[in-house]
Image (spheres, rainbow, N blue to C red):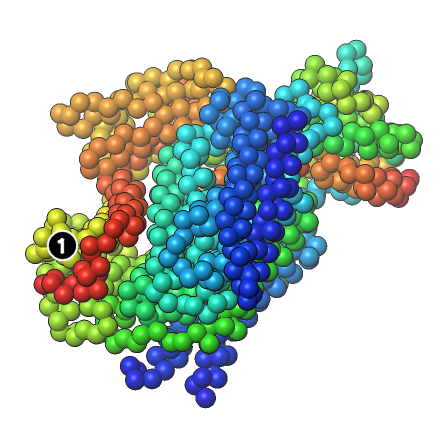
Amino acid sequence: MSLRTIRILLWLPLVGFLIVLGLVFTGLIRPHDASIRSQMVGRPLPAFSLPSTRPRQPPLTSASFADGKVRLVNIFASWCVPCVVEMPQLAQLKQAGVAIEGIASRDTPADSLAFLQRNGDPYDRIGDDKTSAAQIAIGSSGVPETYVVDGKGVIRAQHIGPIQPQDVADILAAVRDAQ
Amino acid sequence: MIAEAGLAALWIAAMLAALQAFLGLGSLKAGGEELLRAVRPVAVAQAVMTLGAFAALMWLFYSTDLSVELVAEDSASTVPTLYRIAGTWGNHEGSMLLWVTILAIAGAAVALLERRLPERTLAATIAAQGVIALGFFAFLLFSSNPFARLDIAPAEGNGFNPLLQDPGLAFHPPTLYVGYVGLSVAFSFAVGALLTRDVGPAFAKAMRPWVLGAWVFLTLGITAGSYWAYYELGWGGWWFWDPTENASLMPWLAATALLHSVTVLATRDGLRAWTVMLAVVAFSMSMVGTFLVRSGILTSVHAFALDPKRGAFILVLLALYIGGALALFGARIATVAEGNRFDPVSREGALVINNLLLSVILALVLIGTLYPLAAESMTGEKLSVGPPYFNATAGPLALILVAVMAAGPAMRWRRDEIVAVARRIAIPAALTVIALVAILLLAPGLRILPLLGLTLAAGVAAASVAPLWKRNLRRTPLFTWGMVMAHLGAAVSLAGMASESAFTKETLIAARPGETVSVGPYAIRFAAVDPVPGQNFTAVQATLIATRGSADPITLTPAQRTFDNPPQTTSESAIATRWDGQLYTVVGEPVPGGRWQLRLWWKPFVTLIWLGGALIAIGGALSLLGRSLPRRKVVAESTGFARFG
Amino acid sequence: MKAKNQRLVLALLALVALVGAVLLGMSALKDQASYFYSPSDAVRDHVELGRTVRLGGMVEKGSLRREPDGVTIDFRVTDGAATVTARYTGIVPDLFREGSGVVAEGRFTAPGRFAADTILAKHDENYKPPELAGNGMHETGSLKR
């Protein structure tokens, strides 16, 4: 009797560990909504007016988005390494006919332009968001992030982190949905 | 080129680890003894290759090769040299590589140096070490490659987190990692002994120096980490119960329990299953610590969600290693013969209580650390578990543990009489009561935990040096000195914690230059605020002149540093250490009216916390020395405290 | 006990100790765990007053006000949908400023009024303890430092 009790007890550590492991695992596979979704999705773009990063170009204003055209707003920075990663995908999206506006976060125009010189420039217009005020108003907590904005200037979708090759289809679908 | 060479070295090391596991297991079979001879060079070659890979990464960081993604992400050419080098392990991939490097070196050391174990157990141990290394090589190669290149190198790197730009950081993680990984050897020993069913004093004696060594490094690492957080964060606290801190505390708790039980096994051949279990738990806690907590599963699910592959990898490895060892334990330990028995009132009995208390504290810390994850995955609620929980649960138990520590060394092995023990600890007990009365009279109105802490610290300090009483100090064996020192260190540290929590004085004020503020016994004149340039930052530095009585004034210069890349501000506290405590000053932001925020603390005897930690580590080092030096002391060990009292 | 089954006794002791630890831990967690609320959660769920909780959101633009003592600040925490007024005495962390993320630990003193004991905020909304910052791949991370 006592011997059997011991034998059962000996397996308890394993059972305990497996329970903890199971817990952690469900935590892992459960779709976490821990990434910071912008509270602004589904709302109009907050008002902003950013001077253009490119010399002698009109500023990037939130008002200019309500012209019936669906656009991507991509927040990037020259000091952001993952931003380099998504540049080919942005170029691909541009090729697919999607209009992309850039917001350069906490950067100098010279650095931004040098960055685009190196990595390609997919942007129609670029707003210089020195203090990242516009970025924060949009509800972005980091770079890079990309937003789909519909023809009425309403934010329809948000992509956090660099756009990887496998994300391009999702973004195109989000753009179609916003039409 | 260097990055590719590093990667190649890593691949070769991984192959060698597989070979090592294969040879070690093969030599367990009948007629396979030949293979064991080949295992040693393989283990050494694996260590050399891994070290080469690590050196390659270090060079890439030192020379700021921005075409390597990791370097671009975590360093920059403007970062000072020391932190360019320390940056090698200041990030996930690099710290994993450091981890594996130490693991491989430890494996080679076991293969080369270990002569006490029976051949078969040694072979099984080396095989286990190879299997562990293999898993982590795979983790590095498949999901955390530190040598990945960027297609296009950026013009400048992201920089190195300014908070981590501190000399303490350069040595803190490596120290902790040596501790974590040293425990992997104990784990491999346990697995090896289970495989060959050879759990006995020889096994314990082989394992003990590794446990002691790992424990010394963990103690140093935790002590240094605590001091680092204390002066670097500028919050005046010395322990925050943060998951990263818990990650280092949990293996330490398990290793402390293991250290005591392995001594029982080595000297009395008791607590066999118990010791094996603790060896498994200790390294499991190291892995849980490094991988679950530091990988960000617990604190930042966002980081993790971006790379679920990495998380899944970690979980599979943990499941294989910890689950495998525990399954082996369940299947095998019943067939290991029972060790020597002992009376409940005996040194062994006291050590069992020590082990139980340590295990309960460990469980409480683990529960508190994992609970936020559990709650979120079950109910979706986000919550955090902070100091109130840990202080309320672990605090009282730690005090009981310290009290047991006073009585334990006064007990004899195998069996003892309660009356005799009571007589032996009479003097420390009397001192405890005197201390209690004195504290109640001198400092009335203390809260219960600091009060008990101070009282117990006095009694335990007395009890811990008691084993030296009436002894020829020159003939006292080193490991007895080690125990005395470590136990004294615990008492000293406890006194510091209790004093800090009971007597700290704080002043928070917005002051103009020229004004005088008082905190504790000090009058502090706010002399000036000046901008000061640094290598990669500019600082705003306040000059404070503190005077107490007729002593020479102390000048303190706390500062706010603004770094250029990445743009961030950190506050640099200024601390003046006196024999009876520390004056801790922080300068905050400018406030309208030409004022600056100042936060000042007087913390009596706070330094005892880390002094105690250092004493504990020195005690461990002395024991280690005593165990490895030639033996004339074996007799003293088995008679224990027969002469004492 | 000495005669037989010391092993069983030890194993049972260990079991009792661990079960005790779990029970103690769970009961302590009930009182001591602090839940995380966004302003919207807090307004919707009517957080119990006086209970230690964490409040996370953005520091609203233009809401930061300093009291005459120079060390107390009032500010509003918002998540875009709801807003809570918070007060804190002390030196704020390095990256605390208007428009940036904040996690504050403290208590609600009245509905919509929060007294912060500690401000944990880094720039990033994803609160990471300082030792962790810089570890781990975090694509949005570059901004946080």
In the rendered structure, the answer to whether residue B372 lies left or right of residue A64 reads: left
Residue found at the far bottom of this picture: A1
- Residue at the extreme left of the image, as rendered: B470
Q: Position of residue B127 (x, y in %)?
A: 54, 56
- Relative vertical location of residue C112 with respect to residue B602 in this rendering, above or below: below
**Residue tagged 1:** B468
Q: Amino acid at mark 1?
A: Leu
Residue appearing at x 55%, y 39% in the figure: B50
Residue at image location 46% in from the left, 50% down from the top: B111
Q: Quadrant of residue A154?
A: top right
In the image, residue C125 above or below residue B386: above
Residue at horizontal 48 percent and vertical 46 percent from the top: B108
Q: Locate residue B68, reporting x and y percent.
A: 65, 29
Number of numbered tags placed on the structure image:
1
Q: Position of residue A7 (x, y in %)?
A: 49, 79
Q: In the figure, is residue C58 to the left or right of B359?
A: right
Q: Residues within 10 Å of mark 1 (few under 14, many from 20)?
A: some
On-image quarter of the C terminus of chain B: bottom left
Which residue is more in the foreground, B380 or B219? B219
Q: Is residue A10 visible?
A: yes
